[in-house]
């Protein structure tokens, strides 16, 4: 009866599947069941691609073999327990996140359900006997008077029992943590490592929180769909440029969901001021326009400083070896040298080579300053653009170091010397260095004013795809190299007092520069380009986050650590408060 019911359900699903139905009419019932089972979890785009290729095979065996091999390869992109969620709705991810959290919660409440503390209990009994024998030996070797014998003996054994109980409690918690970590691994989720301020108790709290699972599963499933798109060569200039359609659509949906949440959540202070989080978000660098303007302001400040110091401007582009590229840039055809590397792995390679280059800079006393922009090539493989300013006499050494590490891996392959690393020295008489990097910053944020990319795609749509790409692979798009802290710069802009006192004149210079978007003046006030962070005259001031009404010190949600919050600036041995209100969150 159950088999009959499942057959009817499968038939009903297939009748609604516009992609699968035409192909099922061409095969017998056994092959139809095979195709339905293997292709069920995937999106229509993936189904269509696999079926088109399969039905171009010369015979049924080759057709089914192609479907089996391709789907098995895609199934490996997700752990077995999540394979059915390859193409799903956010509600489905929510449900399985709640199931995992509830299971972990039940185990945490009653660990004996799975009988995994057996070995810990057995070890505890052995430890009890050994500890008791040790205590007795120590007790017998201690010389005490007859009048004190009973009380001393009781004290020793009370101490021993306390130690036993404490050790067993720790062992029980550690066993619980290990069990839940192994449970997470079954879902392809990396276990939490207790380190720094992360405690074992905090790890367990994370495992029983469905929000923690939800974040992990969203990332796993989003990346699995993008990996599938790359394996099937969807992402290239001829099909779905920079990021797949499904990843781009999911990112747009996520941003809409976030906007709805921000619009329905408010913050309120003790003065009665009330704002939505959306209003606050639109006033800081979360707003794409403000983010772009700030980056350009800082780039312009670096350029102005370089002109004053007589430094050269150099624009550098660094790309990955051929084995990291999925498709050819001209035709979009699959690259036979591709070794299955994903964009996050390619970006890790670029990061690793950059770390080695920076180490060599330090050895040769070379300190470039400027910006680095990471952006996708047509097939999603990242490449880096860097705008650096450097002393004229160190320019050639800088080029040599970057070229050396750019060609260190597979540097002898065809086209590597010409394409892997490119340098353009910017002539200030012909154009602005900031203007040179402007299009790369705008293209990677909102696309406004760029027009079209080099492949003829509208820049506004391109920006959406690049945003989806960066979000999917967790790639940092912009990084400042050298210069002073931008966090201090932003905090200075919160100051409204004017510091004219002689001893505060440096603070006033920095405040005035920040308030007037003068990045060059701010860097000079902060001690120049290459002053170490610990030697900067102005730093951030942190203090405990305290609820004013109750005087309670807020603690971190999972680990119970006291929360330090930015309260202002630290200058000349004193704190200057820039955040005077306490805010609490409330839902609409």
Image: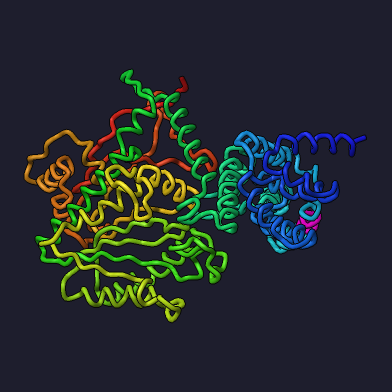
x, y percentage for residue 385?
A: 32, 61
Above or below, 479 relative to 461:
below
Residue nearest the viewer, comparing 271 with 174? 271
Say whether residue 353 is visible: yes
Any magenta on residue 453? no
Above or below, 129 relative to 7:
below
Residue most extreme to the bottom? 412
Toward which corner of the image does residue 119 lie, by quadrant?
A: bottom right
- Display coloring: rainbow
x, y percentage for residue 507?
A: 15, 45
Residue most extreme to the top? 272
Residue nearest the viewer, comparing 135 with 454? 454
Q: Is residue 346 left or right of residue 166?
A: left
- Extent of the magenta region: 122-128
Secondary structure mainly formed by the magenta segment: helix
Q: Is residue 203 left or right of residue 70?
A: left
x, y percentage for residue 63?
A: 75, 58
Say whether residue 133 is visible: no
Query: What residue is rendered at 25% in x and 36% in y?
Result: 577
Marks counted in the figure total 0
x, y percentage for residue 548?
A: 37, 26
Query: What residue is rendered at 49% in x and 32% in y?
Result: 257
Q: Quadrant of the N terminus?
A: top right
Query: What residue is rendered at 74% in x and 62% in y?
Result: 58
Q: Is residue 64 left or right of residue 336?
A: right
């Amino acid at each position: 009866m159950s088999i009959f019911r499942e057959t009817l359900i499968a038939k009903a699903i297939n009748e609604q599947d516009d992609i699968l139905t035409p192909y099922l009419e061409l095969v017998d019932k056994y092959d139809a069941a095979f195709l339905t089972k293997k292709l069920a979890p995937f999106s229509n785009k993936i189904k269509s691609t696999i079926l088109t290729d399969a039905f171009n095979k010369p015979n049924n065996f080759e057709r089914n073999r192609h479907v089996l091999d391709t789907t098995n390869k895609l199934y490996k992109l997700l752990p077995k327990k999540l394979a059915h969620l390859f193409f799903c709705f956010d509600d489905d991810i929510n449900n399985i996140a709640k199931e995992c959290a509830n299971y972990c919660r039940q185990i945490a409440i009653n660990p004996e359900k799975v009988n995994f503390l057996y070995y810990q209990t057995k070890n505890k009994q052995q430890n009890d006997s050994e500890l008791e024998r040790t205590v007795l030996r120590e007790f017998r070797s201690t010389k005490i008077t007859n009048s004190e014998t009973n009380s001393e003996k009781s004290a020793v054994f009370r101490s021993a029992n306390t130690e036993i109980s404490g050790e067993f409690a720790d062992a029980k918690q550690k066993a619980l943590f290990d069990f839940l970590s192994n449970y997470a691994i079954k879902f392809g989720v990396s276990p939490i490592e207790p380190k720094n301020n992360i405690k074992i108790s905090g790890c367990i709290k994370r495992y029983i929180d469905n929000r923690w699972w939800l974040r992990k599963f969203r990332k796993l499933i989003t990346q699995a769909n993008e990996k599938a798109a790359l394996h099937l060569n969807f992402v290239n200039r001829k099909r779905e440029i920079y990021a797949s359609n499904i990843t781009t659509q999911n990112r747009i949906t996520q941003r809409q969901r976030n906007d709805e949440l921000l619009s329905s959540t408010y913050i309120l202070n003790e003065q009665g001021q009330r704002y939505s989080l959306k209003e606050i978000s639109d006033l800081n660098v979360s707003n794409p326009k403000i983010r772009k303007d700030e980056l350009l302001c800082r780039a312009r400040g670096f350029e102005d400083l370089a002109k004053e110091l007589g430094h050269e401007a150099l624009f550098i582009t660094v790309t990955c070896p051929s084995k990291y590229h999925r498709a050819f840039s001209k035709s979009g055809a699959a690259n036979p040298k591709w070794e299955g590397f994903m964009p996050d792995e390619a970006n890790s390679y670029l990061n690793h080579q950059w770390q080695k280059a920076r180490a060599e800079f330090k050895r040769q006393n070379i300190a470039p300053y400027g910006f680095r922009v990471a952006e996708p090539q047509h097939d999603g493989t990242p490449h880096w653009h860097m705008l650096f300013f450097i002393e004229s006499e160190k320019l050639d050494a800088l080029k040599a170091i970057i070229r050396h590490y750019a060609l260190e891996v597979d540097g002898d392959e065809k086209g590597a010397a010409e394409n892997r690393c490119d340098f353009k020295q910017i002539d200030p008489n012909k154009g602005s260095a900031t203007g040179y990097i402007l299009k790369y910053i705008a293209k990677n944020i909102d696309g406004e004013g760029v027009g079209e990319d080099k492949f003829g795609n509208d820049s506004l749509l391109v920006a959406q795809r690049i945003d989806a790409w960066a979000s999917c692979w967790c790639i940092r798009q912009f990084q400042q190299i050298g210069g002073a802290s931008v966090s201090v710069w932003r905090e200075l802009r919160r100051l409204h007092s004017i510091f004219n006192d002689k001893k505060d004149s440096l603070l006033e210079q920095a405040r005035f520069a920040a308030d007037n978007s003068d990045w060059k003046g701010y860097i000079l006030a902060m001690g120049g380009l290459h002053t170490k962070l610990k030697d900067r005259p102005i730093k951030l001031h942190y203090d405990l986050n305290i609820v004013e009404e109750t005087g309670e010190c807020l603690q971190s949600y999972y680990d119970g650590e006291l929360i330090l919050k930015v309260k202002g600036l630290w200058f000349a041995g004193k704190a200057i408060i820039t955040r005077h209100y306490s805010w609490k969150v409330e839902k609409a």
